[in-house]
Amino acid sequence: MSETFTAWSRAEWVDPHTLELALPTNNLRIYFLDKGIVRLRYVSGAVFENIPSYGVDPEYEPDYPELAEEETAYALEVRTPRLIVRIRRADAGLEFIHRRTNTVLNRDAEGMGHRKIEWNGEEKVWVSKHLPEGEHVFGLGDKPWALNLRGRRFEMWGADYYAFKEGSDPLYKNIPFYMGLNRGVQYGIFFDNTMRSYFDIGVANPERLIFGADGGVMDYYFVCGKSAVDTVRLYTCLTGLPPLPPRWALGYHQSKWSYGSEEVVNALVAKLREQRIPCDCVHLDIHHMNQYQDLTWDRTKFPDPPGMISRLEEQGIKVVTIVNPGIKINPDNYVWRSGFERNVFCRRHDGALLEGSVWPGLCNFPDYTAPRTRAWWAHLFKRQIAEYGVRGIWTDMNEPVMFPDKTFPDDTRHDYDGYSCSHLKAHNVYGHCMARATREGMAQFAPDRRPFVLSRSGYAGMQRYAATWTGDCEADWDNLKMANLQCQRLAASGVSFCGSDAGGFLKHPTPELFCRWMQMAAFHGFFRNHSSGEFGGQEPWLFGEEILGYVRHAIEERYRLMPYIYTQFYKYSTQGIPVIRPLALQCEENPDTFWRSSEFFLGDDLYIVPVHHPGETGRFIYIPDGRWYSYWTDELAPRSLKETWVEAPLSRLPVFVRGGAVIPRWPVQQYMGELRNPPCMLDIWWAPNYEHSSSCFSDEGDGYGYLEGLYRYMTFNYIGGRDYFTLVRTDQGHKAFSLPVLMLRIHCLPAGARNIVFTVDGQPRDIRADGKGVYEAEIPVCFTRIEVSFTRE
């Protein structure tokens, strides 16, 4: 090191990818994990304790980059192929610079601070960053606010917020990851601290973004991908690639608080089938239990659970049951008795069992941060999963909650995977660990099926264990809008398998509101109609024939698009690419998009425009760069890169498809698997002078055969000219995996196209017009190249 004054007394490499600096009041380690991921970890003492992270995936393997070090009079710099990390000599402040463009992405202001808390021995920690004018901030999980969080302060402290409204905070989930976007700038920061934490985004000081926590250590990751979507991908890989869900879980779910008897459930399913409303799943809330006790059944109302579940399976309906962490203190209940005997319940600081009231009455609560508790909890699912055939588990009230409106006392003790702590440290990961244990139980007792777990609470990386929804929203237009923003925000925080209580959980929606919410939710990752029975029914047929027809159409379109949706989830599970994307993240090159929030992308090729206001039958939207067509009518959208007026009739939302894209579609099914091997339609929209790549993943829809190669992943490379296009296909996967009949449907050839020549692998084939401007042809299942040419009048 140079003898020039520095704010550190020592700087040395403790291994080839870890730099340690001794600062005046603490030590800093900088871990270079990937060319776009850098970990910053400060400790006040001399020892960097290896406490396990609940956020970072234990299976994450760094792709260590090549590093170059350079000293200047101003700073010490370490360079990866993508980033320059600059440590200022004057104050040890950090600056993150994009290496290719030499653009400053993010830099410390006052930097890292810490202060001892005398009463509990903890230490408040925080970092102060510059917040440049024009920087927009996205992320932080389920916060019910505009997509751009600038000018607000948020906390991470999981809470059951009944009937939350715009700005309600904190909410159920604790995902301390945010992204900064500005002109030519994008990055993410993951603050891996499970204590009560906060993000002050220009409130205390309009020029500062400050994040910190009431204890623990300052430990954060700076993430920068090739694009904003790639930054989300890198963060998702860091915190854990999600498992591929069973295909049925991506279908429509019907739920209520509560369908309270076998007779009611049977009548519900019969009505769904009678009305031809596709549905794959029915959820049973707490009223299916005996006195609200977990993993029990009220045998008066549900006299034959395995028989009922089996009969519903024959109709294509899977059953999901709810569990809560509160275990009723009842020696006659095996769950409580076995937990007491195994000493798995949380205790207070003096050793007394923690007690609190929830739905069953006075309860004890498992400590899911202990491995032995998770093993005990997992074992409890043998009857439900292996014997009764329940296909999914819904974990609720796991923030955790005790009545009335409170959580565990601060002095509650937790194992924390061998690093004992108080509830102050474990609160934000309690529901996360419960979802993990639940998933382990499902995997243990149905090893040949992919588990489906739905969790209300979770921490960063919750996508490894569960899907989620946005919680107890009200049936009003403000909540419809918030549900859309929350789902986009969750997807930008690594959690794409998310949805809302479509139609609203509380109060009763108007027919128009219900219709618009269901139309929007049909394009979200998780699609469930869930409501409180206190306000009447919310099944689709209760809103009149006109609305029933529109809602049925929305659900049917999700089932038609299932090959496309399933492909997006495969890419999410293998690469971390978010399934839905806010417009600002997908189109980051145009700052005008930073102010728009309702429109979102489903994958790369579908652009969804929800309706957020009553009586709105048209609205202004932003048309992205490229050639876009109406998904419904094939009408060409204006090439504007600005606001454009579109019609939005009550019958459907505006949806657009990218020119050059191949969208795989199926015939409508009433449930996944009704058709054993449905024919697959490859719909393609012509685009001149354009190249684009699309894909389609296909497997059995459940089980793990795809991990052994029993799948097909088809990639379609489109090249379009003024009077032709070619489509070249490549495959991955096992040749023995049978493919369905393939149909090609060509949309939007130019008006006046004549003398169409259609060849498949060099052989001329017949093609027919359907009279609506679409050309159709059956094609071989193993084709490799399609060529279409035409002349113009």
Image (cartoon, grey):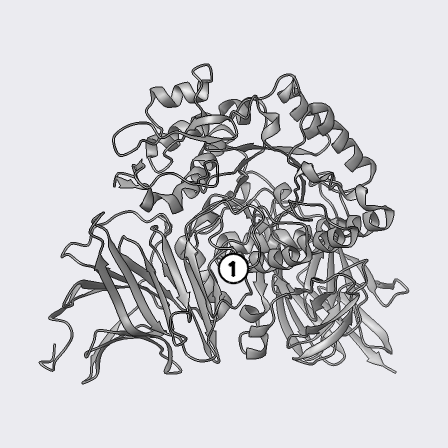
Is residue 243 positioned above or below 284 on the image? below
Residue 700 in sight from this viewpoint: no
Residue located farthest toward the bottom when viewing the structure as drawn: 73
- Can residue 571 be seen here? The reply is yes
Q: Residue furthest front?
A: 404
- Position in image of residue 609 (x %, y %): 69, 65
For the point 46% across and 51% down, which residue is it? 241
Q: Nearer the viewer, residue 113 or 487?
A: 113
Local packing at callout 1 (Cα closer than 10 Å; few below 14, some 14-19, many 20+) is: many
Foreground residue among 612 and 273? 612
Instruction: From the top left corner, tell me how far across and down residue 381 is, in percent.
Output: 49, 27
Q: Secondary structure at mark 1?
A: loop
The residue that label 1 is drawn on is 577
Image position of 413 (left or right of 687): left
Q: Residue at x 29, y 47 (%)?
A: 52
What residue sits 48% from the left and 37% below the top?
Answer: 404
Tag 1: amino acid:
Ile
